[in-house]
Image (spheres, rainbow, N blue to C red):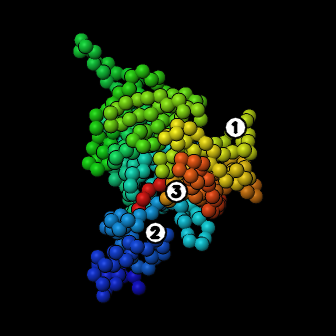
Amino acid sequence: MEQSPEQSPSPLFPSLPDDVTVDIVARVPISRYPTLSLVSRTFRKLIASPKLYKRRSHLGVTEHRVYALLRGPSNGQPRFHILHRKPNSTNRLVVVGSLPPMSPHGTFVPVGSKTYVFNSLDALSVDCASHTLQPILDMPQRMIRKLGSAVDGKVYLIGDSFCSFSDEDGTSWEAWRKAVMVFDTETRTWGAVRIKHGLPYGALWSEAVVLGDKICLGSYRYQHAFDYEPRENKWELNEALRAKDWGEGACVIDDVLYYHDQRLDWGEVAPETALMAFDPKQSRWSAVKGLEEFLAVETYKSIRSNLVKCGEKKLALFFTKRRDGNDVICCAEIGLERRQDGGEIWGKVLSCDVVFEDGLLSIVKCVSVTV
């Protein structure tokens, strides 16, 4: 029986020390946590406790938790939805009611068990274990058209910022420039703004991912693909990445970049779509084998897709399709395997479910955290 509000929570297992109890629950798969939280107020408190997730991390039993930000029509604000992955059952996207709507212009960067949200003038962190928010103070300056990636616990925001300059004669002036702002997630402090001269103002990049120790910036229309080395603040053109319009919704698994290639032809999507992979060691693109028929049938005429890591050597492909005259959001979990050392990559569809049936909502961004 659940304790009344006047009573203090009783131990989960009175005959066991609290630390042993935490160890037991830490080993339970996260997919069982929603059921455990219904047992009592004490269980709900433990499921939301940072201590539990620290213990999971120490034991090495962390799992990937996938979120999709869904946005309504007429410029509605995105809401966090969690992918409930139930054993031997259908996966579903369920709104996280305790989290408020987010800005449609936000940049979302996962680091560990948190997702950092950066708007034009402010920022916050979302604890994905407890589903609570914490503001991030003292954002150095306004930044728009930005992308974000994390390297070694630091978030690098790259975009257009209104920067101040001083000439040799001491004259001060301001102008829009490409810039990099650095946020340290451990100390929750901002570093000095790094200004990049020589690049035009405006939307140059559609996606940012981390490959090795570099941030790779995907270009619009096969232009301005760059590698950014954050430790030394170095920029370099990447002609191999520029060969494909990998756009939004890409992800990285085992230092290989994946994106869903949907070839457009006068507004129609060709049936020969492909899951593409870029190996930075070989500096070349290749199609993932074994998925040709599935992608041709299931993602034909899909308007937009998103990839996100959902486990070891496993990704989730979110895409839209028409079913019984309605727009639905589907999620396919795909296992990945490299058949030979440095050879072809093969994919296997592990599951494919309709995870959201309200056609009024569309996917803005997918993020994966470890809890």
Contact between labelled residues 2 and 3, with CB atoms less than 8 Å apart: no
Secondary-structure class at tag 1: strand
Callout 2 amino acid: Ile
**Which of the two discs, 3 and 2, sits closer to the camera?**
3
| Mark 2 crowdedness (10 Å alpha carbons): few <14, some 14-19, many ≥20 | many
Query: Residue 192 sits in which quadrant?
Result: top left
Secondary-structure class at tag 3: loop
Q: Is 110 positioned to the left or the right of 337 in the image?
A: left
Report how many numbered discs are placed on residues in the image.
Answer: 3
Q: Pointer 3: what residue?
A: 313
Q: Is 357 positioned to the left or the right of 11 in the image?
A: right
Q: Is 75 positioned to the left or the right of 137 in the image?
A: right
Cα separation between marks 3 and 1: 29 Å
Callout 1 amino acid: Leu
Mark drawn on residue 264: 1
Q: Position of residue 110 (x, y in %)?
A: 42, 50
Q: Relative to 321, is 350 above or below?
A: below
Q: Pointer 2: what residue?
A: 30
Q: Earlier in the sequence, mark 3 or mark 2?
A: 2
